Image: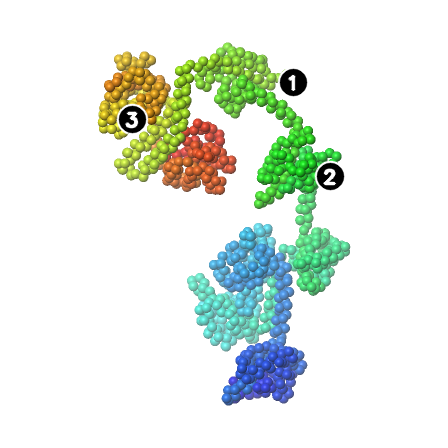
C-alpha cells in the first residue's frame, strides 16, 4: 500500500478495531479512536512516540525492533499476522492480534507499516479457563466406571479414558492407534462411514448394542451411547460403552447413558428446504418446529449469507461435505446469530440428496460456555447412569451426588448437599478410621486411590456394609476435592458368611472321615490334612503341613517305591495301589486323584489312605484257596443250593470249551451234558435232598466222543448248618485209544485247515479286488452293452471262487453244510455253461441232463464245487491233445445203480447219478485206491496240491452220498456221484431285487493294508455318496481318528494287518470313543470270530470277498442302528 492510499482520519475512527501506523523508524504516525481507547491516551499524546519502546513488554522489544528494521530495509518479509502483549495506561497488559501490511512511497520503497489490531485478551483468558476445565473433565472421565471413546469421521480414535483401556486390555498409546472397526466385533471397517452418517442423520444421542473385542480375543456385549460434538468445525463422536455382560437381560432397569447434546442440527433436501431441525436449533434461534419445516433455508439467512450459500452449495454437492462456512441467522426476535456451518451430503432412498448440518455459534464466549456446558452434561450423564454411588466432596463435605447414591442411602441429593460426610457413618469412630485409612492410601499409592470397607448408616438408621473408593482431583492438593464411589456390599457380605459357614461344615465333614486324607501341592508337600491325617503319627505334636508324607512317616528323602501320589504328580492321572510300609504292620489302600485348573495344569493332589490290613489278610487266605482250585487238574464247580453254577475253575471251562460268563447261572447237569441214566438220576436226587454223591457219568464231548468221568458232589453248610452250596469235582477217566489211521486222518485235516487258513486271507483279498472292480465296471456299462454279460461271468466266477475258499475252510473245520432241497439239474447246467467258455476247442463237451430229476438235500455251491473239480481233473487228464468230456445227470433206483457196479453202501430208494467221464489217460489200480486221500497227486511237484478229489470225497460223504470211479490206463476215467432223492418238492426262493443300493452322506474311515482293496472299496463307498478317508497303514489311520474323532461317523477296517490288527485298532478307537460304529472285514482269521468281535464292540463282522450290494447294505445298517 502506498502512502497516497492511506484512509482519512474520520474513516478509520469508525473502524471497530485498533488501527496503527508506524513510520520507517517505528514512530506512531497514525492511530484511530479505538486504538486510543485501548491504549488509554489521546492521539496527540501518541503521535510521534516510539511504539516499541513505549508499548511493548521489555522482553519483546529487542526481537521486535530487529525484525521491524529488517522489514523496513526489505531484507525480510513482514508477518501478515501475529499476536503479542502491549502495555496500556489503565487496562494493564492486553493481548492484541495484529494484521499487518507495509507502506511504500512513490518509488515503491518501504517507508512504514499499517496494522489493525483486535483485543483478544478476553478470548485468551477464556481459552485458558477452557483448558483448565478440560483438564478437570479429563480427571473426572478417567475415574468413570464406563469406557469412553472419542473418534473422528473415519472412526479413528482421538481420545479414550482409562476405563476404555482397562476394558479392552490395551495400553492407551496402542488403543489410540486403532479405530472403531478394530474393537467392535459387529462393526467392520466397511460399515464405519455408513454408521457415522447414520449417527449424523439421527437427532440427539444414539444408543446401540454391540460386542467389543478384548485384546486377548474374547468378545463381550456392550451398550454404547454415541453423541456428536463439534471441535474446530469438525464433528467428533463421543461413545460411552458399558459392559453389560452381567445385566444384559435387565436392560430395562437402566436409563440412557447420555442426555441429548445441545448442538443445533438441520437436515435439508436437494433444493435447500428444511426437512428436520433439532430442539437445540429451535432453542438457539427462537422458532417453533412448524415455522421451520418445509421452508427454504435462505428464509432464515441475512442477505449477505444467502448469496454465500448460493455460491457454496453447488461446490458442496461435488465434495459431498462442507465445513468452516460462516452464516448469519435471523432469530425470531429480530436479532442475528453468527454460526459456523459444518455438515455432509448423503444420498438417501431413491438417490435423493440430503444435507445434514451442525450449526455452531462462533461467538468466542458463547462457544466456550457451550463447550463447558457440554462437558458438564457429559460428566453428569456418566455420573447419573453409573450403577454405583458417585459423588464429589471437598473437605469431606458433599458437593455433588448421583441418583444411585440417593438410592443406596435413602437421602435425596438436596438433603446431603453441603452436609459433612460424617452423617452417613455408623459412628464417629468409623468416620475417623475410614478418613485416616483412605487419605493415607491416597498419599502413598501410585494411583492415589484409597479403598476401604466401612459400616454406613441409611436415612432410616439401618446399617449396611459399603466399599468406599476415593481419588483426588489433584493428587498434589486433595483439598481441591475428592471424587468417591460407594458400593453396597451387603449381598457380598452375606455370600461371604454363607461361604464361611459352608467351609466350616466342610472342615467338620473332612475331619469326620476315618480314612487318612491329605491335600498336597504338585511337589507332594502337604497343604492340609484331616484329623486322621494329622494324627498319623501318635505322640508327635508337629503339624504335617508343609512336609512330605514319606518324610513324616518314615523319615525318607524320596517317595516310597510305587507311590500313587508320585505317579499322579508325574502324569496327572488318578492312581491307586495297595501299599505295605516297612516298620508299619498295617497295609493301606492308597489312591490319589489330581485337581487341575481350566487349562488342565496340575494344581493339587488329593491323597486318600485306607487301612485294609484285615481285608488283605482275608483276601490272601481266599487267594491261596482259589489258587489251589484254579491249578487243580480236576474239574471243580461250585453251585448254589439249587444247583445253579456260581464258579468253575479253568479245568472245567477247558473241558466244556466255554467261558465263565457263559456258564454262570446255568444248571450244572444241563451244561455238563451227562448221559441220562440211573447214575445221573441218583445224583439229582442226592442234590435235591442235600446229600453228597459220587459215581461215574458219561457225556458226549465237543468232538462227539464219549467220555467217562468220575464225579463227586459234596454239600457246603454255614455255621448254623444251613445248606448254602454244592461242590462238584469231576475227573476224566476215559481210556485213550487213538487208532493210527484216525490219528493220521486228524493230522491231514489239521494240515488242510492250516493251509486253508494261511491262504484264505490273501486269496479273499485278491477276490475282493477282482469282484469290486468287476462290479464297478458293470455299473458303468449301459444296459445293452454286450460286455455286461462277460463282466457278469467274471462276477459269478469270483463269487464261486469265494465260496470255494469258504467251503475249504468249512471242510477243514468239519462244520455242517447248509443243506436244503435243491434241483441239481440247474446247478449242473450253470457249471457246464461256465466250463464251456474256459475249455479249449480240443475238448468236446457232451451233456445229458434229465430236467425232470427230483430234488436232493444238498448245498448247491458245494455240488457246484464237486462238478468243477471233477471236470477240471478230466480236462487235465486229457491234456493238450483233447478228447471228449461227457457229463450226465439221471434219477435211478438202487436196482438200476447195481448194473453200474455201484458201491455196496447205497441203500434202497431212489438216487441221482451224476456222471463225469473223460477219454484221458486213465490210471492204474494202485493209484485209483489213493485218489481220495488228502495231498495225493500224480502231477509234477509244484503243479498240484492233492486236495481236489479229497475235497470232492468229503463233500459227497457230508451229503449222505457215495462216489465211485472206474478207470483203466489209456481208456479214460468215469466218476459216479450218488445222492439220495428226497420226497419234498423244491420251492423256489423268491428273491427281491432291489433297484438301487442304499446310499448315504456320512464320513467313513477305511483301513486295509491292500492298496487295491482300499481303492475299490473307497471308490464304491464314494459312488454311494459317502465321504471316505482311506489308509493302508492302520497306525496312521488311528492317529487320524484321534485328531479328528468328531469328523468320523463309521470305521471300516481289515482284520489282518501288520503292526496294528483290525481288532486292536477297534479296541483303541472304542477306548476313546465308545459309541463309534466299526465294521470288521476279514478274508480269514483263526484268532477271532464274529461273536468275539461283537464282544469287543464291533458292530458287524463281514467275510471277504464282499460284493457291492452286501457292503452297501451293511454300511447303511450300521449307520442307521
Query: Residue 109: where, in percent of width, then height?
Result: 52, 87
Structural distance between the alpha carbons of marks 2 and 3: 94 Å
Query: Where 1007 falls versus 969 (above or below)?
Result: below
Kindly tell me whether residue 932 is visible in this rendering.
yes
Structural distance between the alpha carbons of marks 1 and 3: 75 Å
| Residue tagged 2 | 542
Q: Is residue 901 left or right of residue 645?
A: left
Specify the farthest residue to the top.
678
Toward which corner of the image does residue 435 lie, by quadrant? bottom right
The answer to the question of whether label 2 and label 3 lie on touching residues, with beta carbons closer than 8 A, is: no
Kindly tell me whether residue 282 is visible in this rendering.
no
- Pick the residue in front: 488 or 333: 488
Give the foreground label among 2 and 3. Answer: 2
Q: Going 50% across and 67% down the picture, which residue do you hit?
A: 343
Q: How is the image coloured?
A: rainbow
Dot 1: within a 10 Å radius of its alpha carbon, few (fewer than 14), some, or many (20 or more) residues? few
Query: Residue 505: where, in percent of width, then height?
Result: 69, 39
Give the foreground label among 1 and 3. Answer: 3
Name the quarter where the C terminus is drawn: top left
Helix, strand or loop at label 3? It is helix
Give the foreground label among 2 and 1. Answer: 2
Query: Residue 668: where, in percent of width, then height?
Result: 52, 18
Query: Where 585 falls versus 1042 (above or below)?
Result: above
- In the rendered structure, which disc, 2 or 1, sits on the residue that comes first in sequence? 2
| Residue tagged 1 | 719
Structural distance between the alpha carbons of marks 2 and 1: 49 Å
Query: Residue 1104: where, in percent of width, then height?
Result: 39, 31
Dot 3: within a 10 Å radius of its alpha carbon, few (fewer than 14), some, or many (20 or more) residues? some
- In the rendered structure, which disc, 1 or 3, sits on the residue that comes first in sequence? 1
| Residue tagged 3 | 831
Amino acid at each position: 500500500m502506498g502512502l497516497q492510499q492511506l484512509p482519512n482520519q474520520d474513516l478509520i475512527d469508525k473502524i471497530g478495531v485498533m488501527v496503527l501506523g508506524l513510520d520507517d523508524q517505528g514512530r506512531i504516525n497514525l492511530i484511530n479512536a479505538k486504538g486510543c481507547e485501548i491504549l488509554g491516551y489521546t492521539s496527540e499524546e501518541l503521535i510521534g512516540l516510539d511504539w516499541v519502546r513505549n508499548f511493548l513488554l521489555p522482553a519483546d522489544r529487542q526481537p521486535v525492533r530487529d525484525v521491524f528494521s529488517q522489514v523496513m530495509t526489505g531484507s525480510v518479509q513482514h508477518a501478515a499476522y501475529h499476536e503479542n502483549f502491549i502495555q496500556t495506561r489503565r487496562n494493564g497488559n492486553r493481548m492484541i492480534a495484529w494484521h499487518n501490511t507495509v507502506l511504500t512511497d512513490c518509488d515503491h520503497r518501504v517507508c512504514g507499516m499499517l496494522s489493525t489490531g483486535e483485543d483478544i485478551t478476553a478470548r485468551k483468558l477464556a481459552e485458558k479457563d477452557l483448558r483448565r476445565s478440560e483438564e478437570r473433565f479429563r480427571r473426572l472421565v478417567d475415574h468413570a466406571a464406563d469406557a469412553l471413546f472419542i473418534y473422528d469421521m473415519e472412526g479413528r480414535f482421538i481420545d479414550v479414558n482409562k476405563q476404555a483401556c482397562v476394558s479392552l486390555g490395551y495400553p492407551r498409546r496402542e488403543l489410540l492407534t486403532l479405530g472403531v472397526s478394530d474393537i467392535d466385533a459387529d462393526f467392520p471397517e466397511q460399515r464405519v462411514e455408513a454408521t457415522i452418517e447414520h449417527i449424523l442423520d439421527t437427532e440427539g444421542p444414539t444408543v446401540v448394542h454391540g460386542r467389543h473385542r478384548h485384546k486377548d480375543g474374547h468378545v463381550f456385549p456392550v451398550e454404547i451411547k454415541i453423541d456428536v460434538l463439534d471441535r474446530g468445525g469438525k464433528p467428533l463422536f463421543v461413545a460411552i460403552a458399558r459392559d453389560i455382560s452381567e445385566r444384559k437381560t435387565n436392560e430395562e432397569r437402566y436409563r440412557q447413558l447420555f442426555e441429548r447434546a445441545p448442538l443445533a442440527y438441520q437436515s435439508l433436501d436437494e433444493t435447500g428446504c428444511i426437512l428436520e431441525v433439532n430442539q437445540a436449533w429451535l432453542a438457539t434461534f427462537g422458532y417453533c418446529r412448524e415455522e421451520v419445516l418445509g421452508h427454504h433455508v435462505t428464509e432464515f439467512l441475512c442477505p449477505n449469507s444467502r448469496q454465500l450459500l448460493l455460491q457454496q452449495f453447488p461446490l458442496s454437492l461435488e465434495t459431498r461435505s462442507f465445513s468452516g462456512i460462516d452464516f448469519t441467522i435471523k432469530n425470531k426476535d429480530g436479532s442475528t446469530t453468527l454460526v459456523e456451518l459444518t455438515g455432509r451430503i448423503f444420498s438417501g432412498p431413491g438417490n435423493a440428496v440430503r444435507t445434514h448440518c451442525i450449526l455452531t455459534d462462533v461467538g468466542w464466549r458463547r462457544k466456550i460456555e457451550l463447550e463447558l456446558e457440554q462437558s458438564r452434561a457429559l460428566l453428569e450423564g456418566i455420573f447419573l447412569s453409573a450403577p454405583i454411588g458417585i459423588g464429589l466432596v471437598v473437605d469431606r463435605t458433599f458437593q455433588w451426588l448421583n441418583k444411585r447414591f440417593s438410592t443406596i442411602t435413602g437421602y435425596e441429593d438436596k438433603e446431603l448437599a453441603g452436609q459433612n460426610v460424617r452423617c452417613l457413618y455408623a459412628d464417629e469412630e468409623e468416620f475417623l478410621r475410614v478418613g485416616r485409612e483412605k487419605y493415607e492410601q491416597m498419599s502413598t499409592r501410585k494411583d492415589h486411590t484409597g479403598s476401604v470397607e466401612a459400616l454406613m448408616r441409611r436415612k432410616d438408621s439401618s446399617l449396611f456394609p459399603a466399599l468406599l473408593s476415593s481419588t483426588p482431583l489433584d493428587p498434589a492438593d486433595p483439598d481441591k476435592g475428592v471424587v468417591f464411589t460407594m458400593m453396597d456390599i451387603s449381598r457380598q457380605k452375606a455370600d461371604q458368611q454363607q461361604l464361611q459357614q459352608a467351609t466350616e461344615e466342610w472342615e467338620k465333614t473332612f475331619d469326620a472321615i476315618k480314612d487318612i486324607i491329605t491335600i498336597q501341592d504338585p511337589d507332594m508337600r502337604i497343604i492340609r490334612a484331616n484329623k486322621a491325617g494329622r494324627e498319623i503319627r501318635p505322640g508327635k505334636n508337629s503339624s504335617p503341613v508343609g512336609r512330605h508324607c514319606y518324610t513324616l512317616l518314615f523319615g525318607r528323602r524320596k517317595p516310597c517305591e510305587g507311590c500313587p501320589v508320585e505317579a499322579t504328580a508325574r502324569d496327572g492321572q488318578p492312581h491307586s495301589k495297595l501299599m505295605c510300609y516297612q516298620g508299619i504292620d498295617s497295609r493301606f489302600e492308597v489312591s490319589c486323584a489330581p485337581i487341575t485348573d481350566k487349562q488342565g495344569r496340575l494344581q493339587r493332589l488329593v491323597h486318600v489312605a485306607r487301612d485294609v490290613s484285615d481285608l488283605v489278610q482275608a483276601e490272601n487266605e481266599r487267594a491261596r484257596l482259589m489258587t489251589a482250585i484254579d491249578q487243580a487238574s480236576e474239574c471243580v464247580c461250585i453251585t448254589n443250593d439249587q444247583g445253579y453254577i456260581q464258579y468253575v475253575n479253568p479245568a472245567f471251562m477247558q473241558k466244556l470249551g466255554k467261558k465263565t460268563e457263559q456258564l454262570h447261572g446255568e444248571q450244572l447237569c444241563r451244561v455238563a451234558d451227562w448221559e441220562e441214566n440211573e447214575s445221573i438220576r441218583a445224583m439229582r436226587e442226592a442234590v435235591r435232598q442235600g446229600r453228597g454223591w459220587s459215581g461215574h457219568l458219561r457225556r458226549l464231548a465237543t468232538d462227539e466222543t464219549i467220555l467217562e468221568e468220575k464225579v463227586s458232589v459234596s454239600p457246603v453248610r454255614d455255621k448254623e448248618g444251613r445248606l448254602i452250596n454244592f461242590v462238584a469235582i469231576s475227573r476224566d477217566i476215559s481210556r485213550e485209544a487213538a487208532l493210527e489211521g484216525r490219528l493220521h486222518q486228524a493230522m491231514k485235516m489239521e494240515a488242510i485247515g492250516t493251509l486253508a487258513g494261511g491262504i484264505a486271507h490273501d486269496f479273499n483279498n485278491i477276490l475282493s479286488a477282482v469282484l469290486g472292480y468287476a462290479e464297478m465296471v458293470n455299473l458303468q456299462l449301459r444296459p445293452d452293452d454286450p460286455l455286461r454279460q462277460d463282466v457278469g461271468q467274471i462276477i459269478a466266477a469270483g463269487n464261486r471262487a469265494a465260496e470255494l475258499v469258504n467251503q475249504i475252510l468249512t471242510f477243514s473245520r468239519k462244520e455242517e453244510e447248509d443243506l436244503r432241497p435243491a434241483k441239481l439239474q440247474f446247478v449242473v447246467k450253470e457249471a457246464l455253461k461256465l466250463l464251456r467258455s474256459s475249455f479249449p476247442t480240443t475238448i468236446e463237451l457232451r451233456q445229458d441232463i434229465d430236467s425232470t430229476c427230483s430234488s436232493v438235500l444238498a448245498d448247491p455251491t458245494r455240488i457246484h464245487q464237486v462238478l468243477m473239480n471233477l471236470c477240471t481233473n478230466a480236462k487235465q487228464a486229457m491234456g493238450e491233445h483233447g478228447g471228449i468230456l461227457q457229463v450226465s445227470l439221471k434219477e435211478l433206483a438202487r436196482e438200476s445203480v447195481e448194473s453200474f457196479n455201484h458201491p455196496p453202501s447205497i441203500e434202497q430208494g431212489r438216487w441221482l447219478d451224476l456222471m463225469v467221464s473223460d477219454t484221458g489217460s486213465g490210471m492204474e489200480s494202485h493209484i485209483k485206491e489213493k485218489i481220495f486221500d488228502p495231498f495225493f497227486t500224480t502231477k509234477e511237484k509244484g503243479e498240484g496240491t492233492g486236495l481236489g478229489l479229497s475235497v470232492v470225497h468229503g463233500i459227497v460223504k457230508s451229503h449222505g452220498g457215495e462216489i465211485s470211479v472206474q478207470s483203466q490206463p489209456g481208456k479214460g476215467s468215469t466218476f459216479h456221484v450218488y445222492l439220495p432223492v428226497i420226497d419234498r418238492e423244491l420251492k423256489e426262493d423268491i428273491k427281491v431285487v432291489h433297484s438301487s443300493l442304499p446310499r448315504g452322506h456320512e464320513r467313513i474311515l477305511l483301513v486295509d493294508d491292500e492298496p487295491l482293496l482300499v481303492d475299490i472299496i473307497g471308490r464304491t463307498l464314494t459312488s454311494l455318496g459317502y465321504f471316505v478317508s482311506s489308509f493302508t497303514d492302520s497306525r496312521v489311520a488311528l492317529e487320524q481318528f484321534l485328531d479328528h474323532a468328531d469328523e468320523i461317523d463309521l470305521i471300516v477296517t481289515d482284520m489282518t494287518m501288520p503292526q496294528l490288527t483290525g481288532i486292536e485298532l477297534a479296541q483303541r478307537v472304542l477306548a476313546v470313543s465308545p459309541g463309534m460304529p466299526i465294521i470288521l472285514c476279514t478274508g480269514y482269521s483263526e484268532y477271532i470270530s464274529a461273536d468275539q468281535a461283537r464282544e469287543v464292540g464291533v458292530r458287524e463282522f463281514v467275510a471277504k470277498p464282499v460284493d457291492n450290494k452286501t457292503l452297501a447294505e451293511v454300511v447303511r445298517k450300521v449307520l442307521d442302528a
